[in-house]
Image: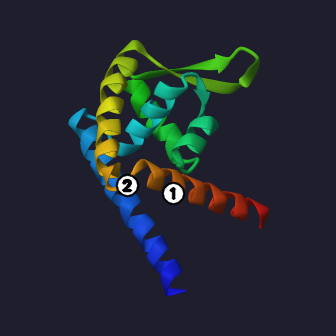
Amino acid sequence: MLQDSYILISIHRMVKELDHETGKIASSHGLTLPQFGVLEALYHQDGLTVGEIKDKILSSNGTVPVIIKNLERQGMIEREKDPQDQRRTIVKLTAKGRQLIAGVVPENEKMFEKKFLAWSLEEKQTLIRLLRQYREYQREE
């Protein structure tokens, strides 16, 4: 039981530290951490719905529309109706948003690479396998 708590606390601390570092990088480019998350999701897959963005950045449904509205005001993203389903809104990067996030993502990835030098390639592969195993176990319950 104590071991389980240690695992949970260690993972939580690691995620918190990485979020803090990502937040510093985002802030240096005039973005909040949630804004960075939305732009990064669109950088990797442009043309997402609000729900798809929410799933990718693990945010609550209520906050994503506010973040999107603010990014739209700043000219970073644009919204358009899905031509196949007018009830859905598609969110896309503008040229300004793409240019900004294209500079931030590599900087953030470099930070991750540096942080994860603590593990060998084999250890990283083991960690990925264990995390997938955990997710699969949780789905089965």
Quadrant in the picture for the C terminus: bottom right
Q: Does residue 75 appear in the picture of this structure? A: no
Q: Position of residue 125 (x, y in %)?
A: 51, 50
For disc 1, the marked residue is: 127
Q: Residues within 10 Å of mark 1 (few under 14, many from 20)?
A: few
- For marks 2 and 1, the one nearer the N-term is 2
For the residues labelled 2 and 1, say whether their Cβ atoms are less than 8 Å apart.
yes
Q: Residue furthest bottom?
A: 1
Q: Residue drawn at (43%, 39%), measured in percent from left and top? A: 37
Q: Position of residue 89 (x, y in %)?
A: 63, 25
Compare residues 23 and 12 and report the one nearer the observer.
12
Q: Residues within 10 Å of mark 2 (few under 14, many from 20)?
A: few
Compare residues 3 and 80 and report the one nearer the observer.
3
- As measured in the structure, the alpha-carbon distance from the residue carrying label 2 to the one carrying label 1 is 10 Å
In the picture, the disc for residue 1 is: none
Q: Residue drawn at (28%, 45%), measured in percent from left and top? A: 114
Q: Position of residue 52 (x, y in %)?
A: 62, 36
Compare residues 7 and 31 and report the one nearer the observer.
7
In the picture, the disc for residue 119 is: 2
Q: Name the secondary structure under disc 1.
A: helix
Q: Name the secondary structure under disc 2.
A: loop
Instruction: Please tell me in which quadrant of the rendered image residue 39 appears.
Output: top left
Q: Residue drawn at (54%, 49%), measured in percent from left and top? A: 58
- Decide: is 125 above or below 91: below
Q: Position of residue 5 (x, y in %)?
A: 49, 79
**Viewed as shown, does residue 91 lie left or right of 12?**
right
Amino acid type of the residue tagged 2 in the rendering = Trp
Q: Residue drawn at (65%, 19%), measured in percent from left and top? A: 81
**Viewed as shown, does residue 21 lie left or right of 67?**
left
Compare residues 81 and 34 and report the one nearer the observer.
34
Amino acid type of the residue tagged 1 in the rendering = Leu
Q: Does residue 126 appear in the picture of this structure? A: yes
